[in-house]
Image (spheres, coloured by chain):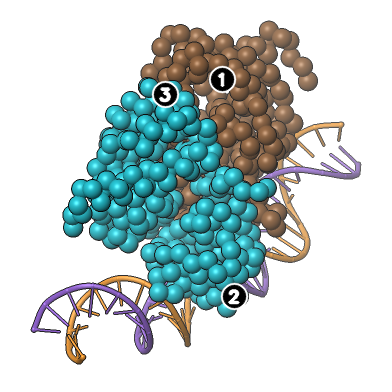
Chain colours: A brown, B cyan, C purple, D orange
DNA sequence: CGGGACTTTGAGGTAGATCAAAAAGTGTGG
DNA sequence: CCACACTTTTTGATCTACCTCAAAGTCCCG
């Protein structure tokens, strides 16, 4: 499915803009740096639902910016069990780290249909050469992802099943709203219960039961492919959730 | 317990040298960059067993290089359960990422007695200013840690208890030997079974049983605070272990 | 209207947790 | 060198959170 060139360019610019805004939350960008990043060339690509767009072990020379939809980072055991180690939403440069480690250590897959914008490393490197501060800014962006992953390890290692699911829902609500969740918020939600089970290390059946528990607690609900926050406080309590690790610049 | 200044300096230099050698495995360093890093000033500090030397939420202005002993990165749930999200051995700059994210998202604690060398960010930043390539090299080092964490998430999410413990033992054997494990290798091993349980998300009692399983399989054994690799192939099979993610430059 | 993907429910099994206590190791002071 | 306290490992017995297997129900799309 092709979009008109202009439309496509607008999509990419909007996603780049989201990304740059998020960078600016945590780093100081000069006007020139800002402009350079917004002008990064790349290729728009529509990815069918649940398709790898970066394969495990592949040598990559482009970084993927999520334009629309959702992307997951997938690991896999020898016996074929999958584990999601990161979820990326529009405005996330999903594998910025590939600039410094170009051999992909895990696969990237679309969740639902997704559009990505592939930015060649050459251009990112050119930007870094022109503005050395960008290296640090990119590095910082990657470290926020690492902090999130560290929280996932804690959650999946030490929370009960309800806690794990609730924590994930709460995290996504925060990231999707770029702030604290609030009662009544709702978001597009392409994740199936199978995806949630791969992210939390549970079985799909058990995730289903935990979603019921969360619904019956009046915390959150997924209906019609949308996530509804019913009671933010309840959800946060269930998942022992504290948004500080997301580094969104919220009140401490 | 104070050591003579000269001795102390030698320790720090040896640890810095290990760190720089490891950087050189994955990045290309010029002679000047090499020399600058080896000359990084810092403070040697001996840490009592099981003491936090970086606290959660603290604002840090120094990065910690492990000189001797072992350090763990600890997360904690509200209910007090602990999860280890990284283990750092001598020659690891345990929180290099603090240069770009100075508010610590998790605590660092010694495992057994440890010696660390605290390198002020100012000097790391000065090095980065003098040699812009260093920013990228530091970033790459952090990304290797992130790749390891991602593997931990996969392991703890999707392997059985024996697999998790075996995988951790195999990883540590590789990192301690800077290569593949080999039958008969042995290493100092300050980790208690309680530590292993915090790293794998299991209970100490169950870790004990899994250690027995691993011993009875003839794969590995801990005796007298030393880890003995009995059969590398068996251990690797038990943990579904593939060393590539460690980026040690081994044969693929 | 039929087929595929996803959710939901049920029944029964098991890996790992929990609780409790003994055994072994380690360090300290007398 | 022994006695004591403390930490760590080991073992046993029981319990339960989550898994497995199976099938029905729902939604969506061609």
Q: Residue at x 52, y 47 (%)?
A: B148
Query: Measured along the vertical axis of the image, is residue B201 above or below residue C13?
Result: above
Real-space CA distance between mark 1 and mark 3, rounded to the nearest whole angstrom: 19 Å
Residue occupied by mark 3: B131
Q: Mark 2 Cα within 10 Å, few/some/many (few <14, many 20+)?
A: some
- Label 2: state its secondary structure: loop
Of residues A209 and A19, which is closer to you in this image?
A19
- Closer to the N terminus: mark 2 or mark 3? 3
Q: Quadrant of the N terminus of chain A?
A: top right
Of residues B45 and B166, which is closer to you in this image?
B45
Label for residue A124? Answer: 1
- Label 3: state its secondary structure: loop
Report the chain holding disc 2.
B
Which mark lies nearer to you, 1 or 3?
3
Q: Residue at x 58, y 32 (%)?
A: A98
Residue occupied by mark 2: B218
Report the chain holding disc 1.
A
Real-space CA distance between mark 2 and mark 1, rounded to the nearest whole angstrom: 49 Å
How many marks do you count on the picture? 3
Real-space CA distance between mark 2 and mark 3, rounded to the nearest whole angstrom: 49 Å
Residue B106 in the figure: left or right of residue A200: left
**Residue A208 in view in this figure:** no
Report the chain holding disc 3.
B
Q: Position of residue A53 (x, y in %)?
A: 70, 33
The reply to whether dot 2 and dot 1 touch (C-beta < 8 Å) is no
The reply to whether dot 1 and dot 3 touch (C-beta < 8 Å) is no
Q: Residue at x 52, y 66 (%)?
A: B185
């Amino acid at each position: 499915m092709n979009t008109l060139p202009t439309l496509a360019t607008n999509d990419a610019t909007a996603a780049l803009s989201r990304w740059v805004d998020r960078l600016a939350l945590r780093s100081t960008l000069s006007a020139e740096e800002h402009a350079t990043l917004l002008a990064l060339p790349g290729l728009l690509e529509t990815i069918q639902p649940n398709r790898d767009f970066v394969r495990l072990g592949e040598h990559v020379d482009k970084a993927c910016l999520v334009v629309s939809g959702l992307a997951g980072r997938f690991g896999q055991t020898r016996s074929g069990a999958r584990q999601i180690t990161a979820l990326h939403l529009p405005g996330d440069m999903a594998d910025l780290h590939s600039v410094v480690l170009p051999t992909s250590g895990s696969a990237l897959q679309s969740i639902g249909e997704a559009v990505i914008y592939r930015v060649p490393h050459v251009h990112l490197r050119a930007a870094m050469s022109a503005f050395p501060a960008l290296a640090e800014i990119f590095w910082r962006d990657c470290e926020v992802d690492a902090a999130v992953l560290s929280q996932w390890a804690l959650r999946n290692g030490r929370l009960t099943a309800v806690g794990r699911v609730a924590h994930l829902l709460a995290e996504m609500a925060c990231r999707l709203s770029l702030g604290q969740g609030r009662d009544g918020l709702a978001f597009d939600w392409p994740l199936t219960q199978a995806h949630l089970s791969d992210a939390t290390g549970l079985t799909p059946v058990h995730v289903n039961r935990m979603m019921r528990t969360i619904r019956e607690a009046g915390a959150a609900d997924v209906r019609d492919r949308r996530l509804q926050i019913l009671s933010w406080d309840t959800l946060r309590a269930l998942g022992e959730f504290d948004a500080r690790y997301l580094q969104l610049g919220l009140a401490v």
